[in-house]
Image: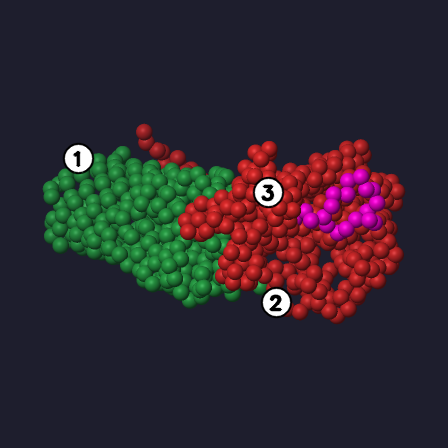
Chain colours: A green, B red
Amino acid sequence: MKIKILVIASMCISTSAFAGGYRVALQGEQATGMGHAGVAMTESAEVVFFNPASMSLLTEQTHISAGITIIDSKTKYQNTAANVAAETDNPYGTPLYLYYVRKYDERISLGLGVYTPYGNTVEWKKDWPGSHLVNNISLKTIFVQPTISFKANNKLSVGFGPIYVNGSVEFNRNLTTGLTENGNRSNVTVEAKGITDWGMNFGVLFKPAEALAVGINYRSLVNLNANDEKANFENIPDTFKSTYPADTTFDAKLVLPAELTIGISYNLNSSTILAVDINRTYWSEYKSLDLTFANGAESNNLRNYNDVNVYRVGIQHKLSNALTIRGGAYFDSTPISDGYHTPETPRNDSTGLTAGASYKITKQMEVDVSFLYLMFKEFKASYDYIDDNNPATLDTSFKGEYISSVKAIGFGLNYKY
Amino acid sequence: MMLKKNQIFKVTGLIISCAVISACDTSFDKPVGDVSYSNGTADFSKFVSIGDSLTAGYADNALYLSGQENSYPAILAQQFAKVGGGSFAQPLVSDNLGGLLIGGNENSEFGNRYVLNAETKSPEPITGTPTTEVTDVLPGPFNNMGVPGAKSFHLLSTDYGDQAGLGAGTANPYFVRFASATNTTMIADAAAQLPSFFVIWVGNNDVLSYATSGGIGTDQRGNINPATYSSSDITDPTAFAGIYTQLVSAFTTANADVKGVLINIPDISTLPYFKTVPYNAVPLDQTNADDLNAAYTAYNKGVTALLAGQPDEVAKRTITFAAGQNAVVISDEDLTDLSGSGLPSMRQATANDLLVLTSSSKIGTPKIENDQTSIWGLGVPLEDADVLIPSEIELINTARLAFNNTIKTTADANDNLLFVDIEAIMAELSTTAGIDYGTGSITAIYATGGGFSLDGVHPTARAYSVIANRIITTINTGFSANIPAVDPGNYTTIFVK
């Protein structure tokens, strides 16, 4: 069986990941198998992310979980009136995690989590029809979270961890649909590396009955402030060079929104657990992407995201002492309103189907595999708020039809002793 | 409710198979380009277009290489090639500067194309020595018979391609470059190719040269002999109708099965050349306004006294300034001539007057160097050439509507001819929203709208592609064809220095 799963896994580089925005919900292979529900699950060190309160409920002295997911995402664009089509050529996304939990005493556990909950890599063909909005973007973040959990009694635990966040972003777009120098499109690249901030992760777990757990988790807003980071305007006509200088700097703020999760897990029988989560992501914090360049020039790009809920359901079933299988689904709605749809985050509402399995190799060691497939419908969208601070602009709205696909496969390893 | 083991297996199997098989691959229900194109009832094997600068691909005050490559006939031919269209030759100039050499000499009338200086926010000719020598005659034939500056009657003129007439102005250097013989005509060279499909877009210059010169020419209504016209005159509509019939019949005689498209003449008030300079945008402070009012006191008093029985004209001619934005003072030859009393025919402009684009560099500057009382538009009235007054606009529109009636009637009378209403297209372009071409939009706002090149009269390559798409739509409907459109977003707009 182990061999069979690995063979299937290696055959299909495919599973699923994210919808609107740039939250990539793949922070544990076991949870991913269950529709990424897990705020009330108490099975592995993945709880460091999903609910620090549950650290105290882990059975062994030490639990370690690590994993990596490979995401294959693609978006296609077309506009029938202009008779054009384009598609992304994204590299594989690779969110990863490492969680460590150690019991300090019967009540207190200590832990550390390293994970990558936000990211976005979209690469359109250079100078494609929407190149005045984005040619390519790459956002990477890493969260490091030392954590403590405290078991108040047999029914109630709490957990808390400060989060150190380190992020990088690289973004390139053309300035307008028309401006060129010697036939080459004028464009700007902004690049910020190693920008940091602090956040926190807080969780509560309540077990009113042996078979039932209720979990609440809150992860705070993180603002990555880029100051004096690199910006470079390229292919700018001479008389615009003072407005758009090469090798300049910019300031900007990138929002990584807060997230609240409430969920339950229920043991249907001795070998089957059902989990249901509701995630609320506070995207409304992301109102505008505002860049200020060294010469005072501003670029204001309205986003006006909305808070959204994600509904997750998952089930896990122990087939034998060694093998556990999982299935799940979730409905993820886009935080983007009509008229604000930019091709840098080209996805709409989606339904995710997930599956997974774990296999115990030894008493201490277990391997996980998970699959995710996100289903998107094609949709018409536009971005109607093209930066009007731009003196060279002659653009108003960019629209067309989009359709996306996201598949992901993840591999995890759990060790306990 | 409990899931059975085999149900769990089924769900898992579904997800894994989704991941592996192509059934879950992403594609649109109706992907673009996934259709078969067809020529319908038209035959595009030999396509010839004839007309003026708009047909040639002229933009930014010059005919330059990339403009020609993106002329609307060239775009059409490129799309026709997908449905049996043949090759399409154009009389290409030698460079992307666009200026002409005549006998090795540069000529101020045919200078280089404009580029925008973003610092001064003004257009200026691109620097460089042009290399297109007019007297190097290109061997034809050419499918694109667009000749910048051509009026309807020029298409029938046997002098128009004769180098010897360049000095006298009876010849056009753009036609001299590729006329098949010194005594040929544009229409003869076009019809000799026995086109299977043609587009005629002429008549623009029959009103436009009068308009861009600020109405300094004459309306030749009633005079059917174009040989007697000056370059800035308005062509007589009867003469135009006769010429137009001859142009169409030249094609239908050469090939009885020929099909074609006839395009009408846009309203000049939709062009940035006439709608960019506001009539009332001269800022003044109170002191300046007071000084000017004092200077015009004598004129205002004189007008009031001499035109006592005509209160309407007195009101029109009374000149007053105030702090803030003020209307400019213009010459108006329609006013009662009081020059005998030392009072010039002048008044302040209104929204009904159209100031030409070139007046913007004149308004606010002194006529006499360092003489602040001789500021154009304030102390000194703008000249006839700087502005179209309502009577001039009416002459233009009367003639233009007559031309358009001829064009529409001709198209309607022949099932093989389709009509494209560029007047409506340009009117749409001049609205606030402009024209939405699918992936973006263009407007008629000068320099930033993307619809008009820096001369304020000619479209950008992007707008030419929009025009080509509209013509394609008309052909698809009228001749049951299915010819794909182009993406205007792929075409350039203005160029910045």
Q: Disc 2, disc 1: CB below 8 Å?
A: no
**Closer mark to the observer between disc 2 and disc 3:** 3
Residue at 54 percent across and 56 percent down: it is B374
Question: Are the residues flagged by discs 1 and 3 from a single subunit?
Answer: no
Q: Is residue A73 magenta?
A: no
Residue at 69 percent across and 49 percent down: it is B216
Occupied quadrant, residue B134 = bottom right
Is residue B372 among the parts visible in the rendering?
Answer: yes
- Write down the chain letter for disc 1: A
In the picture, measured across the screen, residue B38 lies left or right of residue A164, that is: right
How far across and how far down the image is residue A198, in percent? 24, 55
Distance of mark 2 from mark 3, alpha carbons? 35 Å
Tell me the kind of residue under disc 2.
Thr
Number of the label disc, if any, that sits on residue B353? 3
Q: Which residue is mark 2?
A: B127
Q: Disc 2, disc 3: CB below 8 Å?
A: no
- Write down the chain letter for disc 3: B
Residue at 33 percent across and 40 percent down: it is A307
How far across and how far down the image is residue A153, in percent? 11, 42
**SS of the residue at dot 2?**
loop
Tell me the kind of residue under disc 1.
Pro
- Which corner quadrant holds the C terminus of chain A? bottom left
How far across and how far down the image is residue B248, in percent? 82, 42
In the picture, measured across the screen, residue A123 lies left or right of residue A290, that is: right
Number of the label disc, if any, that sits on residue A304? none
Between A168 and B22, the one lying in front of the other is: A168
Occupied quadrant, residue B472 = top right
What is the span of residues highlighted in magenta in the rendered image? B214-232
Q: Is residue B229 magenta?
A: yes
Dot 2 alpha-carbon crowd within 10 angstroms: few under 14, some 14 to 19, many 20 or more: few
Of marks 2 and 3, which one's residue comes earlier in the chain? 2
Between B219 and B90, the one lying in front of the other is: B219
